[in-house]
Image: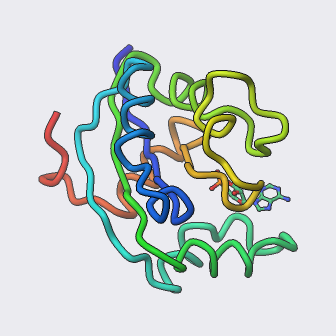
Amino acid sequence: AVTRTFSIIKPDATRRNLTGAVTKMLEEAGLRVVASKRIRMSRGQAEGFYAVHKERPFYNDLCSFMTSGPVVVQVLEGEDAVKRNRDVMGATNPAEAAEGTIRKAYAESIEANSVHGSDSEDNAKIEIEFFFKPEEIVG
Ligand code: CMP
């Protein structure tokens, strides 16, 4: 089925002017950008967005990193969008990411790993609503 997922192009990628290169890989994987905006995440937004990780040792650094520069938040649409997006992103740790994936091509480290993508359909819905109003999504 055609579904939607949520994506973030992270500060390490925007800093290196890779917004287009990353988006091209998403599009070539069969995903369509149906909403997109470049924002500077607030500390509060980062902490709220990553609240599921708040007991993890990397939580504070992660929130600092995500507010360290611009990010591009996107809604992606396509056949089985969550899985399609996760496949083209590659493993969280770039050292484990497969050839041909975004993280293999561009990620600097497990933290500065260039992209975020929702890990389930349920989380995709929650994450899309965290950043977008319905009228900002044009399918
Ligand atoms: P993301 O998909 O944005 O979700 C949580 C992020 O935490 C993850 O990608 C990584 O960039 C970051 N992170 C930093 N350190 C770790 C770690 N040790 N294990 C998992 N994720 C980590």
Q: Relative to the observer, which residue lies in front, 80 or 98? A: 98
Residue at left offset 38%, top offset 52%:
128
For the C terminus, the quadrant is top left
Position of 26 relative to 2 (above/below): below
- From the top left corner, tell me how far across and down residue 104 is, in percent: 69, 35
- From the top left corner, tell me how far across and down residue 66 is, in percent: 56, 72
Quadrant location, ligand no. 1: bottom right
Task: Say left or right for 29 vs 109.
Answer: left
Q: Residue furthest front?
A: 16
Position of 82 relative to 57 (above/below): above
Task: Say left or right for 90 vs 110.
Answer: left
Q: What colour scheme does the image use?
A: rainbow
Q: Quadrant of residue 98?
A: top right
Residue at left offset 52%, top offset 41%:
122
Residue at left offset 38%, top offset 18%:
30
**Total residue callouts:** 0
- From the top left corner, tell me how far across and down residue 70 is, in percent: 41, 71
